[in-house]
Image: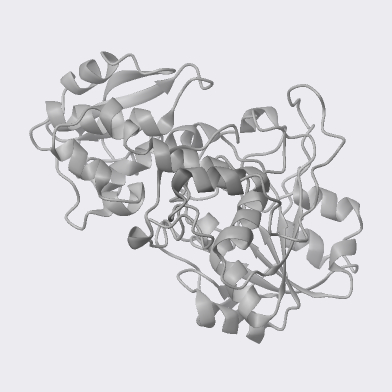
Amino acid sequence: MNLSRRGLLGAGGLAGALAVAGASPATPAATAPDATARPGGAGAGSVRTGFDRLAADGYRRLSGQKVGVVTNPTGVTSDVRHIVDVMHADERVDLVAVFGPEHGFRGTAQAGGSEGRYDDPATGLPVYDTYLKSGGPLADVFTASGVDTVVFDIQDAGARFYTYVWTLYDCMEAAARAGKRFVVLDRPNPVTGRAALGPVLHREFATFVGREPIAQAHGMTVAELARLFNGEFLARPVRLETVTLSGWRRGDFFDVTGLPWVPPSPNMPTPDTALVYAGTCLFEGTNLSEGRGTTRPFELLGAEGVDGRWAEAANALSLPGVRLREAYFAPTFSKFEGRTVGGVQLHVHDRETFDPVRTAIALLVTAARTWSGFAWRADHWIDKLTGSGSVRTMIDAGADTDEIAGAWQDELAAFRAVRRPYLLYR
């Protein structure tokens, strides 16, 4: 596995990665952290998003530019107006295009869908579809739109396989090809930015749920990821600027920011969902339901034939910060639609100690041991989600949670070192 184009995991191995980590970021136009960040924890209304700060500055960074915005329903102000509507009504901004990701600009599409090309009824602006487009075809979209600057403003969920971070990556790459400037408006990582967790993607497993070798729970904001992508992975760096948050610190969960939560996708209804998602999304790679079609997606897991032995086995591991409740539910769509299944519900009682990735591995291990019907999806989707074949093959071989988690510690340490110079917040 090659962690970056600098070859940090090449002949120098982990020691080389640690040595290079102290170097300055290779992203020349990144905005410095806001010096006015408060010394204590966040309070209601204390966090200002990148858009808030851009607007407060009179859109100076966009002056004289034809602007296009990559966004979705999460691109809102603190009073839940959409930034596209706000900028369209402001004569200081020459907004000429909108670019919609998976689920669409206005959020009308389910998982694996988008809205296509249309004119937005509210503003009359042309909306271009970016979903599943990359490289030359996406660069052609930016060129055809006539924009000079591409602005990115989407709320992330903090997990490598949440596709918006790769929409960011693809748009940066395409903007560089098309000769466009790229501005990222930052938003908080809803599950904090304290630490990266879990396995690191191996490049041979790269897909739209993981283009480059970052950790499963990356612990970064989108602006920090943009800096990392530009400095480590893009063959042709884009002209990048980031507009940082003010008032946010790495240990802040979303509920203390004072910002409104808008579901970034249909199955991410609350910040509680995001808290477990970086782990339990792995159940997409199995024949168990990951809770889609319920009011608690990714918190409810189960299948027909599963009984209370699973919750009992998982609780016996005394996993930090979480308890597992025997649960029964009937999904309204997706796996087991309309059928009652048995399984577990995650109840996180101490989010400071909860590790979503290690918890999910423990749940996979105990599910395989307590339910004879356990199986991986035939397409080995689990390998795309975890970033290698290691988790699947180790569980199949009977490895326990500690053995599986231990196998990724060296690559995780290397990634943590690589990401360090690109972090923007204390």
- The image shows residue 188, relative to residue 237, as above or below, that is above
- The image shows residue 125, relative to residue 255, as above or below, that is below
Q: Looking at this view, is 245 or 88 the one in front?
A: 245
Left or right, residue 380 beside residue 156 = left
Q: Quadrant of the N terminus?
A: bottom left
Q: Residue at x 28, y 51 (%)?
A: 383
Residue 157 visible, this angle? no
Q: Position of residue 59 (x, y in %)?
A: 87, 61
Query: What is the residue that sits farthest to the left in this orientation?
Result: 372
Q: Position of residue 216 (x, y in %)?
A: 43, 44
Residue 406 visible, this angle? yes
Quarter of the image for residue 342 reads: top left
Query: What is the residue that sits farthest to the front in this orientation?
Result: 11
Q: Looking at this view, is 85 or 343 the one in front?
A: 343
Left or right, residue 25 beside residue 17 = right
Q: Position of residue 174 (x, y in %)?
A: 59, 75
Q: Position of residue 84 (x, y in %)?
A: 73, 62
Left or right, residue 257 beside residue 246 = left
Left or right, residue 179 beside residue 133 = right
Quarter of the image for residue 228 reads: bottom right
Q: Quadrant of the C terminus?
A: top right
